[in-house]
Amino acid sequence: MSVNVYCDHGTNTPTLVQLQREGRIVIHSFPYDHKNRKFGRLAIPSQAQIRDLNLPIKDMSFRINDAVASPAHNEIACIAGAGNRRDILHLDSAHKSGCKFFFTCDKKDLLSKRTELETLLTIRFYHPVDDLSRFLADLENEER
């Protein structure tokens, strides 16, 4: 059984790609930050505006009506900081998509608040380089 993993912008690593090839994880992402090549499943968008979608209409695997905030959105904003709109969208998309793990390079706004975010969302947070061994151990435990 695969585990859902959300990759924030710039965090998809060869190790994660290999784990996805092996069927151990399913990578989810959403191109809020810019157009990027799709490397996993398109996450369910949060309170996105048309300008946030950064993908052609033909690639939208969701209805515009699905791009609404989850009930946790306001609490996410309180923790991440209301000024970090795109971070909030990524976090809420991961939550709506049922992700158990979240990769980000954002040490200041997200990883420094991982305990609060993990408690709220029941998603574990990792830096793609610094926390890789911890993630691999947690993944093994999840798979048991």
Image (cartoon, grey):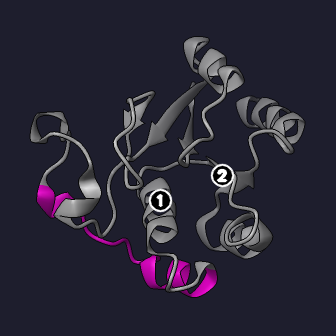
Q: How many other residues sit within 10 Å of disc 2, few (<14), some (14-19) or many (≥20)? A: many
Residue 21 image offset from top left, x and y in percent: 56, 12
| Image side of residue 65 versus residue 48, left or right | left
Q: Is residue 29 above or below residue 15?
A: below
Where residue 141 sits, quadrant-wise, is top right
Q: Secondary structure at mark 1?
A: helix
Where residue 42 sits, quadrant-wise, is top left
Disc 2/disc 1 C-alpha distance (Å)? 10 Å
Residue depicted at 38% across the width and 30% down the height = 38
Disc nearer the start of the sequence (2/1): 1
Q: Quadrant of the N terminus?
A: top right
Residue depicted at 13% across the width and 62% down the height = 65
Q: Secondary structure of the magenta portion, mostly?
A: helix
Give the extent of the magenta segment. 64-79
Where residue 76 sits, quadrant-wise, is bottom right
Q: Is residue 60 magenta?
A: no
For disc 1, the marked residue is 90
Q: Is residue 24 above or below residue 90?
A: above
Residue 138 image offset from top left, x and y in percent: 81, 40
Q: Amino acid at mark 1?
A: His
Q: Quadrant of the C terminus?
A: top right
| Image side of residue 129 versus residue 66, left or right | right
Q: Secondary structure at mark 2?
A: loop
Residue 63 image offset from top left, x and y in percent: 13, 52
Residue lying at the far front in this picture: please name it.
Answer: 34
Residue 100 or residue 130, whichever sits in front:
130
Q: Amino acid at mark 2?
A: Thr
Badge 2 vs badge 1, beta-carbon distance below 8 Å: yes
Residue depicted at 58% across the width and 42% down the height = 10
For disc 2, the marked residue is 104
